[in-house]
Amino acid sequence: GEKRLCLPQILNSVLRDFSLQQINSVCDELHIYCSRCTADQLEILKVMGILPFSAPSCGLITKTDAERLCNALLYGGTYPPHCKKEFSSTIELELTEKSFKVYHECFGKCKGLLVPELYNNPSAACIQCLDCRLMYPPHKFVVHSHKSLENRTCHWGFDSANWRSYILLSQDYTGKEEKARLGQFLDEMKEKFDYSNKYKRKAPRIPSDPPASKKPKIDDSASQSPTSAEKEKQSSWLRSLSSSSNKSIGCVHPRQRLS
């Protein structure tokens, strides 16, 4: 029931600067496995101009796994505004009058420090990871993690565009008034640049009984790892897909782009 993306399209656009060996290595580490499209799906991809008509087959990857793969290969944090890179081993927290701690529970969890003053555009790096001390935009922070990466967990239903549902107020705040005050600050931050008004429609915020739709959809059941023969078969199939497309896919349909 989850959206799937065209794998060759991702390889030839978003991940075009990475070799198949690098991509295969990350897929093995994250236990990401792809499926083949049906004949009808293959025909649609060709008609839409996403695949050449000579393509014999096509791999599909779930949107959740595509986000995990791209995060591992592409997403890096930035240094805090007042940090000198030559002294990066001693990065300090960006403590301000309005900053407060938040966390997410996606792909292994992560704690961060939200600096509202830095959130001046939708892609602003305004959340500082408490582990590496680097700064991330909200939609990249929710896929960032250091500790338990849950590589053997079956993940589904994730969409970084829904970061407003995944970022939560830190549980370190126990006082009733403090939680209410900071919760209001977090709500105000989430309402900024919410052009589709999705978050505002979920107001008022009810901490004691949050809507199910605001929880990350993570299945804790362990995924079945395929045999080494199957993994080798997939690697060779991935190489054949790339060679068949020959990195000549020039039409990237907007509906297929990763966020």
Image: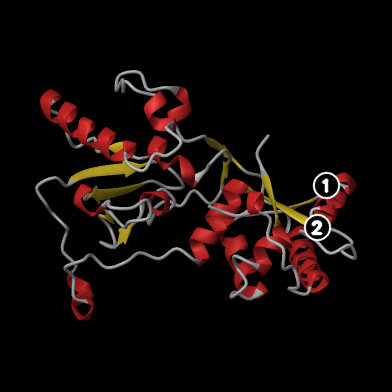
Residue reaching furthest left?
Answer: 97
How far apart marks 2 and 1 lie (CA) works out to 9 Å
In-image side of 184 versus 228 (left or right) = left
Question: Where the N terminus falls, by quadrant?
Answer: top right
Mark sitting on residue 152 = none
Identify the residue at the far front of this view. Answer: 195
Amino acid residing under circle 1:
Gln
Give whichever of 44, 136 is nearer the camera: 44
Q: Quadrant of residue 222?
A: top right
Quadrant in the picture for residue 55: bottom right
Categorize mark 1 by other alpha carbons within 10 Å: few (<14), some (14-19), many (20+). Answer: some
Residue that label 2 marks: 58
Q: Nearer the viewer, mark 2 or mark 1?
A: 1
* Amino acid type shown at disc 2: Cys
Q: Is residue 93 left or right of residue 69?
A: left
Q: Residue at x 53, y 54 (%)?
A: 68
Q: For the view shown, which residue lies furthest in the bottom direction?
A: 86
Q: Position of residue 249 (x, y in %)?
A: 74, 68
Question: Where's residue 232, x and y in %?
Answer: 75, 65
**Circle 1: element type:** helix
Q: Nearer the viewer, residue 238 or 51?
A: 51
Q: Secondary structure at mark 2?
A: loop
For the residues bearing labels 2 and 1, Cβ distance under 8 angstroms: yes
As drawn, is 68 to the left or to the right of 180?
A: right
Using the image as rendered, state which of residue 252 and residue 84 is in the foreground. Answer: 252
Residue annotated with mark 1: 41
Residue 128 image-quadrant placement? bottom left
Counting other residues with Cα less than 10 Å from the Cα at mark 2, is it few (<14), some (14-19), or many (20 or more)?
A: many
Residue 174 higher or lower than 224, as above or below: above
Residue 65 is left or right of residue 114, and the answer is right
Residue appearing at x 25%, y 61% in the figure? 133
